[in-house]
Amino acid sequence: MDEDTSLSRRSMLGAGALALAAFSGCLGGPDDLTPTPIVERPAGQEISATTDETCEKPEKRNSKDPLVVEFDSREALRCQGRLLDGFEDLSRWKTYEGSVGGDLSTVAGGTQSARLTAKGSRAWMYRRFEDGLDLSDRDVSVAVHPGEDDTRVTQFRLQLLAPDRENRVEMWHGVDGVGGWMRLDSGPTKFVGDPDLSDVREVRIQSLAEGANAVSCNVDGLRTTPKVSEPAVVLTFDGAHATQYQHAFPIMQKYGFPGAVGVTPRLLGTFKHLDASRLAEMRKAGWDVVSNPRREKPLPEYPPKKREELIRTSKQWLVDNGFEDGARFIHWPQGRADATTLDLGAKYHYMGFLDGQSLTGRITGPMTVGRVNGDDAERTLETLERAERSGQIAVVEYHTVGAPNDNRVSVDEFVRTMRRIKELELRVLTPSDLWEMQSTGT
């Protein structure tokens, strides 16, 4: 599929879902596959000349449960843009560290993925483009499987040499606490020299397993998508803490910025937490009120049945209290979600927000949208600068704002960040806006 995916929009009340028929998505492999040893392609089996996979529209769910969303957003969005490399022909790829081979058993699309292994803590593969690759108006994403147990990867790095090592773009994405297949929508975490993205001569994919003596992971579906129309920022808040209304809300109102506040139902109305009336006021001002389930432990540490109960309880409260638009989205507690948790999340939500420190462009991995920690004000300001320079979207994560006796962001630091957003003329989006962008192409 060499043409950019065209998405059209249908507005809906209640769940506010995008029309299933509008998406030209594709069906992928299971999210909970465990990597298996590298296998050879059977003798006589030809490698397809095309670099693209077969993409189909996602199936509409046949459920009468009002909390279940109409379709799996991962299937709907994972085939956006163009496939740069499906890793069907690994003769194009070389390694700096470790080895790479085809894996026919653990795949996200097509017939095989690339299996990266190394005896040390890092495996590193690359592909050269002798005539140069123009990525000046496109963003990059890749499907990854971090692996399992002692060899699992904690971080993936993409590097674009444009045109050489002294002029490159670094794109880092943490995956610690996340399992199974996921798509990473990557944005710059560092510019080295003065890279010219109209002349990319080498693409590198590096996997890091911090503290491990070996690496074993899989990558698949390296894609490019058109850039969004203008750089933007999404301001998210976890835990519905009282300082979010007392301090952040009036400051953002002054600048005309909306945000998104994550709700943990059992905490609402208790000491230092918001109640439904405050949340309704924020929603009236243009905010999204989204799901942020129970936080004592990350969801993967609960049995699957309990996880689903927690996800459903949080969403049910939102729907019952008039926050249907925000109920489509979830902030993953403590930034962790394994394969089973991602599957459950995609059953009830269209987008999920993790940690990761990476910018994003047009989304191909809607359940694993990365966020930058807003408590680190200097890093957040640097991220905003990179978003403006690269034409991408920064999603910022806050908890308390100006709370006494904690080490979170101060009021002064928060004001400084909001002022910089205004100076950079970044568009401020809610998760609803971000989701709508996937259908309008803006």
Image (cartoon, grey):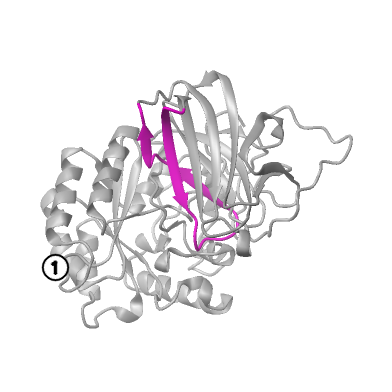
- The image quadrant where one finds the C terminus is top left
Q: Secondary structure at mark 1?
A: helix
The quadrant holding residue 95 is top right
Residue 200 visible within the image = yes
The structure residue drawn at horizontal position 54% and vertical position 43%, both measured from the top left corner, is 206
Residue 20 visible within the image = no
Check if residue 73 falls in the magenta segment: no
Q: Farthest top residue?
A: 131
The residue singled out by tag 1 in the image is 246
- The relative height of residue 206 versus residue 215 in the rendered view (above or below) is above
Check if residue 172 falls in the magenta segment: yes
Q: Nearer the viewer, residue 106 or 311?
A: 106
- The image quadrant where one finds the N terminus is top right
Q: Position of residue 176 (x, y in %)?
A: 49, 60
Q: Position of residue 310 (x, y in %)?
A: 46, 76
Q: Position of residue 55 (x, y in %)?
A: 64, 40
The structure residue drawn at horizontal position 25% and vertical position 74%, both measured from the top left corner, is 276
Q: Nearer the viewer, residue 296 or 231?
A: 296
Which amino acid lies under the numbered mark 1 shown in the image of this protein? Gln
Residues rendered magenta in the picture: 165-193
